Amino acid sequence: MQALVLSKDTTPDKSERYDPLSLSSVPTPEVGSDHTLIQIHAAALNHRDVFIRQGLYPRIVYGSILGSDGSGIEVSSGQRVLINPSVNWEHDPLGPEDAAKYGMLGLLPFPGTFAEYVAVPKRLVHPIPPHLSFEEAAALPLAGLTAWRAVMSKGGVGTGSVVLVSGIGGGVALFALQFAVAAGAKVFVTSSDPEKIRKAVTLGAAGGVNYKDDDWPKQLTSMAKQPVDVVIDGAGGDSIAAYTKLLRVGGKLVSYGATTGSIASVVLPVIFLKQLQLLGSTMGNEKEFAQMVKFVEQHRIRPVVNGVWDGLGKAEDIFDKMRKGSQFGKLVLRIRSDTQGKL
């Protein structure tokens, strides 16, 4: 079968590391008794894949097939399925039962979805909600699971909640918006792009502000007309202090990423005097994944797909698009053409 395999960048005197991918012929995976073989129809890109190529991810293993998100046909049953990329985290609400064994698809010892076939544990395979195409289904797993745990499990968002989602346009932020809106929350967003804010409003956001404006917290306060119950943030950096001031007494700040900075300064009296909860969140367990897929089906949520590229040979085009950071929604590779799966 064909797959995209990671190798080491050996270019001398290169200012920026960016490990190459090669389209290679590799053996079709063998299937053990507790595994099942999936013929991949579509796979989605995540920032994780870019970070791995840049050397900014822990425990990189060369020879890995990249890709965490995938959908396709289960060979044994002929069923349309999507794959939970979170491996060895069954049900513990606090975190993986054994952190040493936990991992995600797309970095050895776990296979990746940028391939024609992948073999995964049977328990990680779920039927695709009937209203979704293969491309939309491939866009859902990693970002959807991360958003679900942040919004629902950690944030406790529900009817009447006032929610702020930062950095709208990325996959997790968009799912956070969609899930919160479907749950009955009033959602505001931030972005540096007015067009992304406009698109977010079409998806149900009550409004948004440009975080590059010096007075954006004041703008948001005026817009919301009440304190925020929950902040869902993937940016980190200097904005964290502003979020703590926007939150109501007892409010929650859920952090799932740090794209603008790993170090944040906060005024501790604001934290303890306002009884704030600072919550870290990443990925999720198998129970949460099943809950997320069920919610998507019940509310007929459609992942926002920015674009679809045909074939594994288009991998560099899709990586270039993500590195530019201009996308609004998920970037998807269509690995196998099929009329029932096309957008």
Image: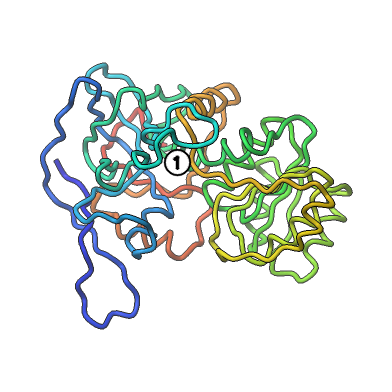
Classify 10 Å Cα crowding around label 1: few (below 14), some (14-19), many (20 and above).
many
Q: Amino acid at mark 1?
A: Leu
Q: Give the image location of residue 165, x and y in percent.
A: 67, 49
Instruction: Give the labeled residue for mark 1.
Output: 142
In the figure, is residue 335 to the left or right of 252? Answer: left
Q: Nearer the viewer, residue 9 or 273?
A: 273
How many marks the image carries: the answer is 1
Q: Residue sitting at 34 percent across and 58 percent down?
A: 52
Q: Give the image location of residue 334, x and y in percent.
A: 32, 42
Q: Give the image location of residue 276, x and y in percent.
A: 76, 47
Q: Quadrant of the C terminus?
A: top left
For the view shown, which residue lies furthest in the top direction?
77
Q: Nearer the viewer, residue 101 or 307?
A: 101
Instruction: Note whether 181 is above or below 330 in the view shown.
Output: above
In the figure, is residue 276 to the left or right of 294? Answer: right
Coloring scheme used: rainbow
Residue 96, picture quadrant: top left
Q: Quadrant of the N terminus?
A: top left
Q: Secondary structure at mark 1?
A: helix
Q: Residue sitting at 20 percent across and 46 percent down?
A: 3
Q: Nearer the viewer, residue 248 or 137?
A: 248
Q: Residue sitting at 68 percent across and 53 percent down?
A: 198
Q: Give the image location of residue 337, x and y in percent.
A: 28, 37
Residue 269, picture quadrant: bottom right
